[in-house]
Structures are given as C-alpha cells and as structure tokens.
Image (tube, rainbow, N blue to C red):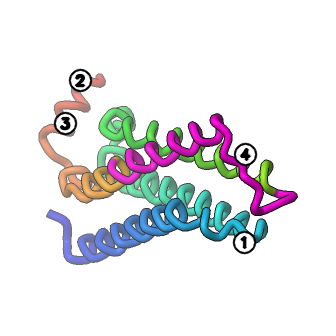
Amino acid sequence: MPTAMHLGRYKLILWVQYLLLVIDLFMNSFTELLRFENVILLVLYVIQDICILFAVIVVFLLFFNTYIFQAGLVGILINKFKSTIIVVFVYFCLCIGLHVWGMTMRWDDPNKDIWNNGYIALFVLQRTAAVLYYYTYKRSALRLGDPRLYQDSEWIRKEFEKRR
C-alpha cells in the first residue's frame, strides 16, 4: 500500500489533472463567445493547447514513477494506456487544426461567418473527440493511482518472465 505521503501527492496530482480537464472544458464551451477580439481568442487557444500538453506531461511523469516502468516493462504501460495515448494525440491534433483554421478564416474580420461545411465537420469531430479525451484521460488518471503499479507484485514478475 502507498504511504500517506504518496497518497497525499497522488491526490494533489489528481486535482491538477482535473483542473487541466476543467480548463479544457471551459475553453471548448466559451471561446466562441469571445471571438470579438482575435488576440483574446488566440491567447485562449494557446492556453488550451498548453493545458493539453501539460496533461500529457503529467501522465507520462506518472508513468515514469511506476515500478513497472522502472523495472523496464514499458510495453505493459503502453498496452495498458494505449487508448489514452491515441485519443490524446488525436484530440490535440484536432484542436490545433480547428484553432489554426478558425483563426486563419476570421483574422481580418473577427465577426465573419466562418461556418462552412468543412469547418462544421472539424468542429463536431473535435468536440466529439473532446468527450472521448475527457473520459479516457480521467479513467487513466484514476487507474494510475492503483498501488499495484508502484510496488513489486506477483503479476509484474509473471510479466517480466514472459518478456525473457
């Protein structure tokens, strides 16, 4: 079992992860309402993209702290969290694409109607990927709190034997 110090640190990291998700949800919900000024919108988009990158960094730092990673069984972690890694990468690419396309089309006139069929499709795809991102990221954040990942156990030894 993790010590009280590890549990307290995990709670702090979990709250940071939740904060990053809430910031992203806020940005997805309200940035279109702030489109009257391009610079404000650009700054908000950059903040959203940086928060996604920070979320990925936090997950990988948690990976590095696991006993499995330190034992050299990185493949187990990648298989266990493959869906999260893929969803985060796809979501980040969709966000960048949506932000760049939207800013490019409305830079000269912030109130311009930019809602063509391609942009609507990308918008819907990005928002759908956001739901998947929130779900998989939160699930992974909770799964990374499993004490079995941070200590030697029988199932890790069996996995290690399979790899030899």
Instruction: Give neighbour class at mark 3: few <14, some 14-19, many 20+ (Cα, 10 Å).
Output: few
Residue positioned most to the front = 113
Q: Which mark is residue 124?
A: none
Q: In the rendered image, which residue does mark 1 sit on?
A: 40
Toward the viewer: 101 or 47? 101
Q: Nearer the viewer, mark 1 or mark 2?
A: 1
Q: In the rendered image, which residue does mark 3 sit on?
A: 157
Toward the viewer: 79 or 148? 79
Inspect the image, locate mark 4, and give the three-letter code of the amino acid beneath it. Trp
Inspect the image, locate mark 1, and give the three-letter code of the amino acid beneath it. Ile
| Residue 92 coordinates in the image, percent (x, y) | 56, 47
Q: In the rendered image, which residue does mark 2 sit on?
A: 162
Instruction: Give neighbour class at mark 4: few <14, some 14-19, many 20+ (Cα, 10 Å).
Output: some
Q: In the rendered image, which residue does mark 4 sit on?
A: 101
Choose the circle earlier in sequence order: 2 or 4: 4
Toward the viewer: 5 or 112? 112
Is the magenta region chiefly helix, strand or loop?
helix
| Residue 75 coordinates in the image, percent (x, y) | 37, 32
Asked if residue 8 is positioned above or below residue 54 in the image, the reply reads: below
Q: Give left or right: position of 92 versus 66.
A: right
Inspect the image, locate mark 3, and give the three-letter code of the amino acid beneath it. Arg
Asked if residue 75 is positioned above or below residue 9 in the image, the reply reads: above
Secondary structure under badge 3? Answer: helix
Q: What residue span does the magenta drawing correspond to?
A: 107-135
Q: Nearer the viewer, mark 2 or mark 4?
A: 4
